[in-house]
Structure formats: C-alpha cells, structure tokens
Image (spheres, rainbow, N blue to C red):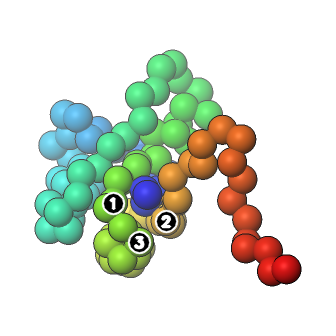
C-alpha cells in the first residue's frame, strides 16, 4: 500500500528530494521522519510539461491502511501539498479487484 502525494506546482519547481536544501524538501523530510516513513520521488528524464508534473509526485510506502490514512491526513495539512491519497498495491496480472458477489 502506498500514499501518493502531489506537490503544488510552485513547490514542485523548487523541490529536490535527493540533494535538496530548499525549505520544501526539508519540511517534507522532517514530516516523513516524524511519521516514520520514507519519501520517494520518481526517476524523471528530460524536461517538459509532463516531466514537470511528475516532479511533484512523491510516493510513500506504508505497512497498512491505518498508517496510510494517518500519513494522508498529515500531508494534506501541509501548505505545499496539492493532494494526497491512499493507493492500494496493484493486483497481480489476471486478478481484478471487485466487490464480493452474493449468491
């Protein structure tokens, strides 16, 4: 299970998780440490509008839904966050997720 976090465009432009000494990177690292989770940014090659959008996307692996919801709530409270949501792990190929069927 993961939490997807989207930074606001202005925050994403200044953000550098790997080397960042900027205020946004430091704030997010501090919050992640406080929550006991690790932020991961996506590897992005090239420049352009699509890459700019992806630069602001962070993923946080969480062990369970309870932790995920706590992380989502905390991230949504930060001024640099546009959105945060819980994302279930992908189902294996050939398996679909659906509601149980009653017979």
Q: Please state the horizontal and vertical placement of residue 33, each as a whole percent of the image.
A: 14, 60
Q: Is 3 displayed left or right of 95 in the figure? A: left
In the picture of the structure, the residue carrying the numbered disc 3 is: 65
Gap between marks 1 and 3, in whole Å? 8 Å
- Placement of 48 over or under 15, stated as above or below: above
Point out the image quarter for the N terminus: bottom left
Residue beneath the point at 73% across and 73% down: 100
Q: Please state the horizontal and vertical placement of residue 24, each as a whole percent of the image.
A: 27, 54
In the picture of the structure, the residue carrying the numbered disc 2 is: 86
| Residue 94 appears in the picture as rendered | yes
Label number found at residue 42: none
Q: Are marks 1 and 2 in contact (CB under 8 Å)?
A: yes
The residue lying furthest to the top in this view is 46
The residue lying furthest to the right in this view is 103
Q: Are marks 1 and 3 in contact (CB under 8 Å)?
A: yes
Name the N-terminal-most of marks 1 and 2: 1
Helix, strand or loop status at disc 1: loop
Name the N-terminal-most of marks 2 and 3: 3
Q: Are marks 2 and 3 in contact (CB under 8 Å)?
A: yes
Point out the image quarter for the C terminus: bottom right
Badge 3: how crowded within 10 Å, few (<14), some, or many (20+)? some
Gap between marks 1 and 2, in whole Å? 9 Å
In the picture of the structure, the residue carrying the numbered disc 1 is: 62
Name the quadrant containing residue 14: top left
Helix, strand or loop status at disc 2: strand
């Amino acid at each position: 299970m993961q939490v997807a976090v989207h930074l606001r465009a202005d925050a994403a432009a200044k953000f550098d998780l790997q080397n960042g000494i900027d205020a946004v990177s430091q704030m997010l690292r501090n919050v992640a440490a406080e929550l006991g989770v690790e932020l991961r940014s996506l590897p992005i090659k090239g420049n352009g509008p699509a890459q700019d959008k992806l630069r602001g996307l962070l993923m946080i692996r969480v062990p369970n839904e309870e932790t995920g919801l706590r992380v989502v709530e905390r991230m949504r409270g930060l001024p640099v966050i546009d959105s945060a949501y819980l994302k279930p792990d992908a189902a294996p190929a050939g398996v679909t997720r659906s509601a149980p069927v009653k017979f």
